[in-house]
Image (spheres, helix red, strand yellow):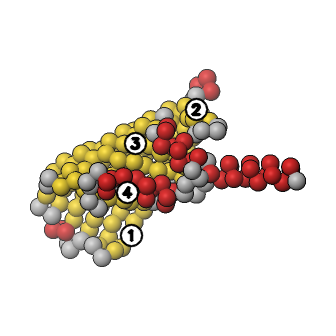
């Protein structure tokens, strides 16, 4: 009986500690459809280590309106490279393309950072405490006049308390994203 209880406890704990949460700041250059502007944003990146998926919640002031958006990081790949004296760096790569009602959309991003031991509550994991990266989005609508190109530089910082709270509550990536969505709504941002 005790063995079954310990196995159940270990299974529950192992399945609950699956999220990494990072805060980020970004600067995005948007060009196309008669626009050439810079948008500064901040927000939250939630990574599910079990499914290798991620969701990004971005917030910014656009034309005087506090707005936020939620987007998936497509096809997230994590690669680790070993360095000298046991050090390592992590590289995250995401990208994808789709044909939607607004036309053809292609996205891509890469982020890297030096690995460190991160406290997830009941255990530590080796991942970057902070990492930087760049990305792009290409939207092809109606011919050349419908093209929008977006380039972005992003800095991420590990959100220790948010990560520990999410894992202790056994949140899924969807539940964590919804929690941050509700937080942004309560701060006066519109979706």
Proximity of marks 1 and 4: CB atoms separated by less than 8 Å = no
Kind of element beneath mark 1: strand
The 10 Å Cα crowd at callout 2, few under 14, some 14 to 19, many 20 or more, is few
Kind of element beneath mark 3: strand
First-in-chain label (3 vs 2): 3
Q: Position of residue 142 (x, y in %)?
A: 20, 74
First-in-chain label (2 vs 4): 2
User: What residue sits 44% from the left and 35% below the top?
Assistant: 130
Can residue 81 be spotted in the picture? no
Name the residue at the top extreme. 85
Q: CA distance from mark 4 to mark 3?
A: 16 Å
Q: Position of residue 106 (x, y in %)?
A: 35, 63
Q: CA distance from mark 1 to mark 4?
A: 28 Å
Given residues 65 and 99, the one toward you in this image is 65
| Circle 4 residue | 182
First-in-chain label (1 vs 4): 1
| Circle 1 residue | 98
For residue 23, the mark is: 3
Give the number of the mark in front: 2 or 4: 4
For residue 117, the mark is: 2
Given residues 122 and 31, the one toward you in this image is 122
Q: CA distance from mark 2 to mark 4?
A: 30 Å
Q: CA distance from mark 3 to mark 1?
A: 27 Å
The 10 Å Cα crowd at callout 1, few under 14, some 14 to 19, many 20 or more, is few
Can residue 42 be spotted in the picture? yes
Q: Position of residue 17 (x, y in %)?
A: 61, 48
Q: Where is residue 156, by image quadrant?
A: top left
Give the number of the mark in front: 4 or 3: 4
């Amino acid at each position: 009986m005790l063995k079954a209880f310990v196995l159940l406890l270990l299974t529950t704990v192992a399945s609950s500690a699956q999220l990494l949460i990072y805060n980020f700041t970004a600067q995005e250059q948007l060009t196309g459809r008669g626009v050439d502007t810079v948008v500064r944003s901040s927000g939250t990146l939630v990574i599910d280590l079990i499914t290798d998926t991620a969701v990004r919640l971005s917030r910014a002031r656009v034309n005087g309106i506090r707005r936020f958006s939620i987007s998936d990081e497509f096809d997230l790949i994590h690669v680790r490279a070993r360095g000298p004296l046991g050090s390592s760096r992590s590289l995250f790569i995401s990208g994808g393309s789709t044909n939607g009602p607004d036309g053809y959309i292609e996205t891509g991003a890469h982020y890297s950072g030096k690995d460190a031991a991160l406290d997830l509550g009941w255990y530590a994991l080796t991942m970057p405490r902070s990492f930087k990266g760049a990305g792009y989005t290409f939207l092809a609508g109606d011919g050349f006049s419908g093209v929008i190109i977006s380039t972005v530089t992003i800095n991420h910082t590990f959100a220790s308390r948010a990560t520990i709270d999410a894992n202790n509550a056994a949140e899924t990536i969807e539940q964590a994203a919804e929690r941050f969505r509700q937080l942004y709504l309560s701060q006066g941002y519109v979706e």
